[in-house]
Image (tube, rainbow, N blue to C red):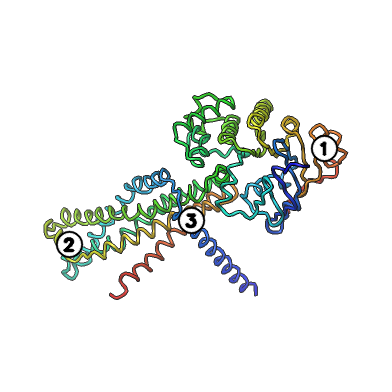
Amino acid sequence: MTETPKIALAGVHKSFGPKTVLNGIDLEVARGESLVIIGGSGTGKSVMLKCILGLLHPDSGSIRVDGRETTRLNSRDRERLLHKFGMLFQGAALFDSLPVWENVAFGLIQGEHMPRPRARDIAVAKLGAVGLGPEVANLSPAELSGGMQKRVALARAIADEPEIIFFDEPTTGLDPIMADVINELIVQCVKDLGATAVTITHDMASARKIADRIAMIYQGRIIWTGHASDIDDSGNPYVDQFVHGRADGPIRMQIRAL
Amino acid sequence: MGFLAAIGRAFLVFLGATGNVAMFTGIAVSHCLRPPIYLRQVLRQMIDIGYYSLPVVGLTALFTGMVLALQSYSGFARFQAEGAIATVVVLSVTRELGPVLAGLMVAGRIGAAMAAEIGTMRVTEQIDALSTLSTNPYKYLVVPRLIAGLTMLPLLVLVADIIGVFGGFLVSVYRLGFNPASYISRTWEFLEPVDVISGLVKAGVFGFMIALMGCYFGYRSRGGAQGVGQATTNAVVAASILILVFNYLITGIFFSDK
């Protein structure tokens, strides 16, 4: 690869007490590509994203963004770096003390010190981009359905036009139709922004729709990466078992907690 | 040996918790001194702590002053010292009861609310969302609460002092038949600035402690509704105990020569 990857992880380890969650993650994401990371619950997908964002500190290993090491940034440089990122959280994580438009405009007002009326106009435009009318802008997040909350959260994640967007299980808890709506919106938004996207999911329909490339994580390691079109003949028994959702195979479910 | 080990373990847990609180305080205070300060949030917290606590603090002070007058009358009448009631009421209220009772009431009202709000934001990933929107959670959540606690509690206690003395006045004049003019002049006679000032210093410290405990336990809460409930309880208990301990320490500093 001649170009510097947008994000590069090498040998990232993270343990919580005796439990090893990330056991040497190696992963590269190229500029402008959409990578989907699949894997079962509790395999360290969310922890990996949080390590890249600096919400958690890896025990060892290197995480580079645009070729620059980020694991030892001080809090000011970290804040500057996070300007490049947007994230859609699994539970939407909207601020329930603020109306919908202020949620969407939050990064613009607090992070970029934009005047409130202008930020509001942009927020309404972003809400339009995810298919929500201006009448939603003044509601409180608690008044919205789960699907609408996800859309607002998506609008918030793209509002200050980040270079990198993370999606944490974007379709979990939605009905299949709403899930597909969100998938379409993600594809559309990422394309419009020209952003690099990393999505973690265990929803294969979602993965097929969003991904340029797919990586599978198992027991804290990336065990397979390949093009989205190759997912059905990966030749990897772990991937096969996951893609087809079989209980039998090399992956044994951890029934008992460690 | 098991018994000794248990003592040692409890002691280590205590030391660890003290260290965590100290680190949290250090980070939070360092953010208080560095811009930006979110004035809108500071104002919101000031209204919450100062204005909306007025009824509960006012009622507490009123009845405390009233009962103080009544009790001292029935006690002092035994040795013909009824004339000291005005002095007893004003000194007890300004030095001790005003700050301590207002502090305890606000700890229940505000400390619990802070822990619950920040704890819920933690478990629903709203605090992580703040970071990804380039907003430091300490600056946005903790600093405004600390500033509001530190500044608003002295004002509340000043109001409580006045209302408490007024409560004593009401009972003495309308129930016990004192002369209003001589009661008021008796109130002023032995009151010194240090009596009021020490009470206000206590109030500032208590306000800071209440906000600090609310934020600390909220910030560290884990594991859903139960974790948030636990954080709320811990915040109120810790704040109340710290109020009583610091009350003694500050009294010692102000009045040790007497």
Q: CA distance from mark 2 to mark 3?
A: 41 Å
Q: Position of residue A254 (x, y in %)?
A: 77, 48
> Is A158 positioned to the left or the right of B89 in the image?
right
**Amino acid under label 3?**
Ala
Q: Residue furthest right?
A: A235
> Is A161 positioned to the left or the right of B114 in the image?
right
Residue tagged 3 = B28
Which chain does the numbered disc 1 sit on?
A
Instruction: Locate the N terminus of chain A and report the quarter of the image it occupies.
Output: top right
Same chain assignment for discs 1 and 3: no
Mark 1 and mark 3 in contact? Answer it, CB < 8 Å: no
* Viewer-side label of 2, 3: 3
Q: Position of residue B122 (x, y in %)?
A: 56, 47
- Say which quarter of the image contains residue A116: top left
- Of residue B134 and residue B165, the one placed in the foreground of this image is B134
**Amino acid under label 1?**
Arg
Residue tagged 2 = B188
Q: CA distance from mark 1 to mark 3?
A: 50 Å
Residue tagged 1 = A246
- Say which quarter of the image contains residue A176: top right
Q: Position of residue A161 (x, y in %)?
A: 59, 35
